[in-house]
């Protein structure tokens, strides 16, 4: 299984520290000074990949003209609705159940990364179709029509985790 964190040092670490500090509402000059000062104390840091990607996206958004007045985007919450993620994507004509691999995303980015990717899908039927197409066995309680999206996403993540554990056990 691949690591879900990334080691940063030097200028990359200072850039991360500056982005995190600036994300808390501190002005740019103070955030830069604090990042440099922390960079002298710390030799390296390990950052989780999913929040690191969200920080990079928010930094790119703030560098665009006219984006300085908007607040930086936050990491999508797995329990929150997918309305924000669905609103930012153009409507698709037909859902692709192979848009991303459930097992590889879980292995690369962990459970949180998979839940973030699943949050971009706002239709329960599409979530079930993706699980079925990728041979992820869902519990019977998740197959009903009245299942909340958050519970369905959590169920898919648990099923993917179980599938990976079963593969590892069979390989021994």
Image: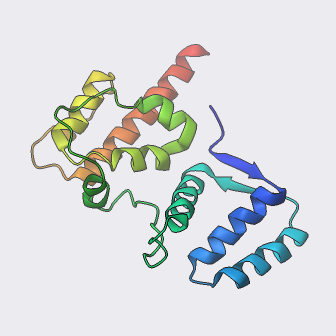
Q: Give how far across and how far down residue 3 sits, in percent.
A: 66, 40
Q: In the displayed structure, would residue 6 be above or below residue 24?
A: above
Colouring style? rainbow
Residue nearer the viewer, 38 or 150: 38
Measured as percent of width and height from the top left, residue 153 is found at: 31, 46
Q: Position of residue 23 (x, y in %)?
A: 57, 74
For the point 88% across and 61% down, the residue is 43
Q: Relative to 28, is 146 on the left or the right?
A: left
Q: Residue furthest left?
A: 145
Residue ID at (25%, 59%): 83
Residue shown at 71%/82% (left/top)? 29
Q: Quadrant of the C terminus?
A: top right
Q: Quadrant of residue 159?
A: top left
Q: Is residue 111 above or below residue 160?
A: below
Camera sees residue 141:
no
Looking at the image, residue 105 lies above or below residue 163? below
**Position of residue 9 in the picture relative to residue 88 (left or right):** right
Residue at the front extreme of this rendering: 65
Q: Is residue 8 left or right of residue 129?
A: right
Q: Residue at x 41, y 60 (%)?
A: 76
């Amino acid at each position: 299984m691949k690591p879900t964190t990334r080691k940063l040092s030097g200028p990359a670490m200072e850039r991360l520290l500056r982005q995190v500090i600036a994300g808390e509402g501190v002005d740019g000059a103070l955030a830069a000074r604090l990042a440099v000062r922390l960079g002298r104390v710390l030799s390296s840091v390990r950052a989780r990949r999913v929040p690191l990607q969200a920080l990079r996206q928010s930094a790119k958004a703030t560098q665009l003209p006219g984006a300085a007045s908007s607040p930086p985007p936050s990491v999508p919450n797995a329990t929150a609705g997918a309305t924000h993620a669905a609103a930012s994507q153009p409507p698709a004509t037909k859902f692709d159940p192979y848009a991303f691999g459930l097992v590889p995303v879980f292995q690369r980015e962990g459970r949180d990364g998979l839940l973030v990717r699943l949050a971009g899908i706002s239709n329960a039927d599409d979530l079930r179709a993706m699980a079925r197409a990728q041979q992820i066995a869902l519990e019977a309680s998740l197959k009903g029509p009245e299942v909340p999206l958050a519970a369905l996403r959590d169920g898919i993540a648990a099923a993917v985790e179980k599938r990976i554990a079963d593969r590892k056990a069979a390989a021994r």
